Amino acid sequence: MSYSSTYSFAGRTVRRMGYGAMQLAGPGVFGPPRDKAAALTVLREALAAGVNHIDTSDFYGPHVTNQIIKEALHPYPDDLIIVTKVGAVRGADAEWLPAQAPADIERAVHDNLRNLGLDALDVVNLRIMGNIHAPSEAPIARQVEALASLQRRGLVRHIGLSNVTAAQVEEAQGIAEIVCVQNHYNLVHRDDDALIDALGRQGIAYVPFFPLGGFTPIQSGELNRIAASAGATPMQLALAWLLHRAPNILLIPGTSSPAHLHENLKAAQLPLSDALMTELHRIGKTG
């Protein structure tokens, strides 16, 4: 089974295998990294390997991850898209706190601009807190309008959404063009199947997080078994399945290890036969 390795995203052509920078911060995505030199190396090696889509946020650290990205990569290559997100802040004890008022969103955009060393942000995802890692229905017009205002001022080029429902996507689209949706989705957590296909028909990217999140022990065991028989790691197989699932899926696996970076990137070359895809689909139906 073959698939395109690139996708048209926010007016650019990006490789579908990107990089998520969250793990560049310290434990719990808080404070400085244990090994800053390795963090700088990971970013530089990602770009050298052809990655041109990096996902980040100024609440990773906070500020730490964006500052490392700037140190490692600034001035940025013309083909690199940096996608950041707003909608939360970190408490003194590393809590993830909602920051959804218009003033919070504007402050976050300026924080991202400053720490990334940019005059305008390529894409800003509005992170709706919901149930933290799962969306919940609630109006989001006020937050989207705040971000759209910053877009009109030239500080934000494109707008995306994170942790949202299909109804919230539709609500946001009545206010601004939406170029991507970033939600929890993987081989066994497939609540967004219909949303992914609907976005694909509109040419909108879908960016899943937690590629191995929410697996039961039985499901993890099955994935491990299939991965071993395919000569791959479970993470590689989970990433490859996502690439084959839909052409509008863009991946952002994260790591602070150069070795793991290259291991993840190999998932883009992992062939999946129809029989193997069928076997993987069955995992989601096991308990």
Image: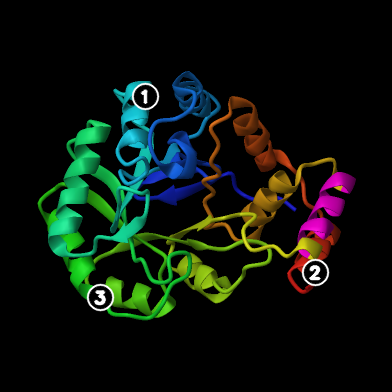
Q: Which residues are magenta?
A: 219-229
Q: How is the image coloured?
A: rainbow
Q: Position of residue 272 (x, y in %)?
A: 78, 51
Q: Position of residue 166 (x, y in %)?
A: 43, 76
Mark 2 closeness class: few <14, some 14–19, many ≥20 residues within 10 Å = some
**Marked residue nearer the N-terminal end (1 or 3):** 1
User: Residue 160 bears which disc, if any?
Assistant: none
Q: Amino acid at mark 2?
A: Arg
Q: Which residue is mark 1?
A: 73
Q: Distance of mark 2 from mark 1, alpha carbons?
A: 41 Å
Q: Amino acid at mark 3?
A: Gly
The answer to whether residue 204 is above or below residue 27 is below
**Marked residue nearer the N-terminal end (2 or 1):** 1
Residue farthest front in this picture: 93
Q: Distance of mark 3 from mark 2, alpha carbons?
A: 38 Å
At 44% from the left edge and 43% from the top edge, which residue is drawn?
29
**SS label for mark 2:** helix
Mark 1 closeness class: few <14, some 14–19, many ≥20 residues within 10 Å = some
Magenta highlight on residue 226:
yes
Residue farthest right in this picture: 229
Q: Distance of mark 1 from mark 3, alpha carbons?
A: 36 Å
User: Residue 174 bears which disc, if any?
Assistant: 3
Q: Amino acid at mark 1?
A: Leu
Q: Which residue is mark 2?
A: 282
